Image (cartoon, rainbow, N blue to C red):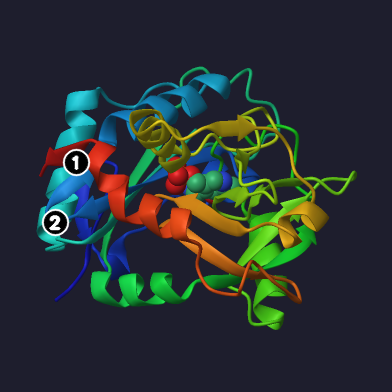
């Protein structure tokens, strides 16, 4: 089946899905994106993803390219044309194309570039991998000071993941100059500390406020599980009882190893697996 990609109002075959050579997303990383889970023919947490997309655009003063109803139609049509039942949908909005110029203050008449891509995932395979858990590598955080905006400037994340791969780890946990974990290269970081408390770093400009993180906090409230929002060091994470990551594509994924240190007994933690299995009970599931 030929994959179809939405680009600026058109549904195009994958090989023809192109944007302009002078697109500011391409030249300056002047673009934002979202990734939303598709599960059993439902879009998961669409409202929160759209809220965050609009916030990212607002922080960068990129005009809103379309209304929510239009986004909803584009995502569903892209999913439908690619016959995705389980997988993800990716949205990207750049400031648009114009002759290269650092300044954006004159670019008042720019028309944003909009891209939507849908992709299937093998849920059974993902589930089987999650039960085993993943290793992560601690890597210095070299990103900028506005990690709360979901921009496409992903080179530091890409490089960190390459470093993780070198030691057979699936994700990098980034740490600041004081040794505190900020977040994963493409996920949020959580531990159950040595006292048994669930801990994650508070949302700030240093991390992305993950939609999965926010929805998981709903689950914790529903189940009366206490959460401590504080920073933790790599050393503390290595001594933790449990560790896990959250993201829209990997959901709640157990971390069983950080660098050379096994977490707990080296198997996914009990609370982690419970949170993974109950996650969708609180997530918003909108029909396609
Ligand atoms: N942090 C970063 C840096 C990410 O790239 C992601 C994935 N988009 C997350 C956290 C998790 O966010 P979400 O739960 O919304 O996928």
Q: Nearer the viewer, residue 98 or 201?
A: 201
Q: Is residue 93 above or below residue 60?
A: below
Residue drawn where x is 45% and y is 35% of the image: 225
Q: Residue furthest right?
A: 178
**Image quarter of the C terminus:** top left
Q: Is residue 225 left or right of residue 89?
A: right
Residue at 48%, 51% in the rendered image: 246
Secondary structure type for disc 2? loop
On the image, the x and y values in percent for residue 128 come to 34, 77
Label 2 or label 1, whichever comes before in sequence order:
2
* Residue corresponding to mark 2: 40
* Residue 220 sits in quarter: top left
Q: Is residue 63 left or right of residue 29?
A: left
Vertical comparison of 170 with 254: above or below: below
Question: Between residues 210 and 282, which one lies in front from this camera angle?
Answer: 282
Residue 155: mark in rendering: none
> Which quadrant of the structure image shows residue 177?
top right
Q: Identify the residue position indicated by label 1 in the image.
A: 74
In the rendered image, residue 152, in percent from the top left (x then y), is placed at 55, 47
Q: Is residue 265 above or below residue 141?
A: below
Give residue 255's position: percent from left, percent from top: 57, 65
Residue occupying the far front of the picture: 195
Q: Point out residue 73 in the picture as x, y percentages from the top left corner.
A: 14, 37
For label 1, count other residues whose C-alpha is less than 10 Å away and answer few (under 14), some (14-19) or many (20+). Answer: many
């Amino acid at each position: 089946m030929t994959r179809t990609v939405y680009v600026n109002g058109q549904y195009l075959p994958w090989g023809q899905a192109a944007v302009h050579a002078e697109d500011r997303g391409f030249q300056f990383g002047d673009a934002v994106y979202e990734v939303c889970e598709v599960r059993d023919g439902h879009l998961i947490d669409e409202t929160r993803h759209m809220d965050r997309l609009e916030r990212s655009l607002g922080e960068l003063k990129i005009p809103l390219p379309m209304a929510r109803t239009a986004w909803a139609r584009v995502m569903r049509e892209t999913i439908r044309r690619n016959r995705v039942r389980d997988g993800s949908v990716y949205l990207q909005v750049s400031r648009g194309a114009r002759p290269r110029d650092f300044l954006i203050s004159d670019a008042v008449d720019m028309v944003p570039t909009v891209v939507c891509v849908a992709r299937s995932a093998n849920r059974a395979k993902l589930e089987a991998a999650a039960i085993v858990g993943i290793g992560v590598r601690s890597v210095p955080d070299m990103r900028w000071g506005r990690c709360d905006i979901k921009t496409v400037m992903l080179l530091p994340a890409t490089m960190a993941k390459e470093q993780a791969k070198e030691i057979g780890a699936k994700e990098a946990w980034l740490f600041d100059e004081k040794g505190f974990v900020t977040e994963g290269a493409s996920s949020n970081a959580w531990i159950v500390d040595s006292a048994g408390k669930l801990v994650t770093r508070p949302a700030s400009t240093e991390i992305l406020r993950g939609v999965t993180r926010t929805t998981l906090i709903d689950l914790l409230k529903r189940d009366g599980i206490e959460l401590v929002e504080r920073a933790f060091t790599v050393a503390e994470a290595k001594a933790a009882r449990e560790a896990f990551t959250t993201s829209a594509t990997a959901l709640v994924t157990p971390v069983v190893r950080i660098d050379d240190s096994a977490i707990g007994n080296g198997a996914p933690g009990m609370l982690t697996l419970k949170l993974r299995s109950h996650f969708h009970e609180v997530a918003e599931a909108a029909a396609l």
